[in-house]
Amino acid sequence: MKKIKVGIIGVGRMGQIHLDNLCLKFPDVEVVAISDVMEESKKFADQYGVNKFYKNCNDLIADSEVEAVVICSPTDQHADNIMTAARAGKEVFCEKPMDLSLETVKKVLSVVEETGIKFMLGFNRRFDPNFMKIRSLIDEGKVGEPQIVKITSRDPGPPPISYIKTSGGMFLDMTIHDFDMARFMTDSPVKEVFAVGRNLTDPEIGKAGDIDTAVITLTFENGAIATIDNCRKAVYGYDQRVEVFGSKGMAGTHNNTPDNHYYYDQNGQSASLPLHFFMDRYIRSYYNEMKEFMDCLITNTKPKVGGEDGLISLAIGLAANLSMKENRVVRLSEILND
């Protein structure tokens, strides 16, 4: 069977995850080129036996051997990378978000539609086995019609202030995954957004113009309600939980831990804390999402997560920012200008 020839743009933290998976776990895929502005990143090409290394990503896109491009470049380069690759006829997988501007995202989607390429956005949490199980229980009718979705998403510690200053804010950087997860669990368009945010864990985050703690309520067109609570700092680890309550029952997931032991003594009970880093917690989901993309290329089908999902999640994030600023409920149509 002919192998799919892939090029990876950006081999930072996420790029290295996809490079490792594609090279070691996908026998039907060959990574033929990687690109990174850092010359020292060439070591990854040597390490994984990738023959071509480009400092300029446009050279990788122009390489006639490359059939599909995995984009893991900085956020502010995603839109240009996607459009350049699409116009070159390459299939594209891109880490979220496409951009922090709705107008730019709409332009990207227009190019994707015009060129007819396969395009998938990296909302990896949809492919986490725990969350996929909840979704399957909903699909099987065991939960009934979802009525309340509760999402807890708390990081073990905040990223560097230098990153926060360019991240677009917590709602567009962190909570955007939870907005997508809420949509994934309800299968209904978001109607209204209300958000409350505070700076409670690190005053430097506030000085950078961002928040670190928030609660967001989403109301869906079908009447369902979702609540999301976020914090940049949970001292006990990476806290990731989802619960869906419906007309026939409830489904939820606990945190992943290094083991499932518990211990009792005269002082009480103890157990392992949650995994401490997103790369540990979601390692399986990164494999699963890339398998989805590669399967779509092999079977000529449309990926389950596309550009429209990115557009809507970005719009919800912008609505949350506006809601927090003006202390009011914001209709999503205000943001999308429907």
Image: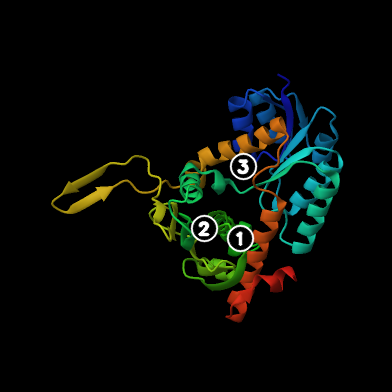
**Is residue 91 shown left or right of residue 131?**
right
**Is residue 128 shown left or right of residue 235?**
right
Secondary-structure class at tag 2: loop
Front residue of this view, candidates 16 and 42: 16
**What residue appears at the point 56 percent right and 47 percent down from the top-left corner?**
126
Q: How far across and down, in percent of the image, does residue 215 sit?
A: 49, 69
- The image's mark for residue 164 is 1
Residue 216 can be seen in this image:
yes
Which residue, as the protein is rendered here, is positioned at the far left? Answer: 266
Secondary-structure class at tag 1: helix
Image height of 170 relative to 113, above or below: below
Which of the two discs, 1 and 3, labels the residue nearer the N terminus?
A: 3
- The image's mark for residue 14 is 3
Q: How far across and down, in percent of the image, does residue 308 sit?
A: 71, 55
Front residue of this view, candidates 204 and 183: 183
Inter-mark Cα distance, 1 to 3 = 18 Å
Name the residue tied to disc 2.
158
| Kind of residue at disc 1 | Ile
In the rendered picture of this protein, how many numbered marks are placed on residues?
3
* Number of residues whose C-alpha sits closer than 10 Å to that of mark 3, classed few (under 14), some (14–19) or many (20 or more): some
Front residue of this view, candidates 146 and 214: 146
C-beta proximity under 8 Å, tags 1 and 2: yes
**What residue appears at the point 85 percent right and 48 percent down from the top-left corner?**
114
**Is residue 251 shown left or right of residue 271?**
right
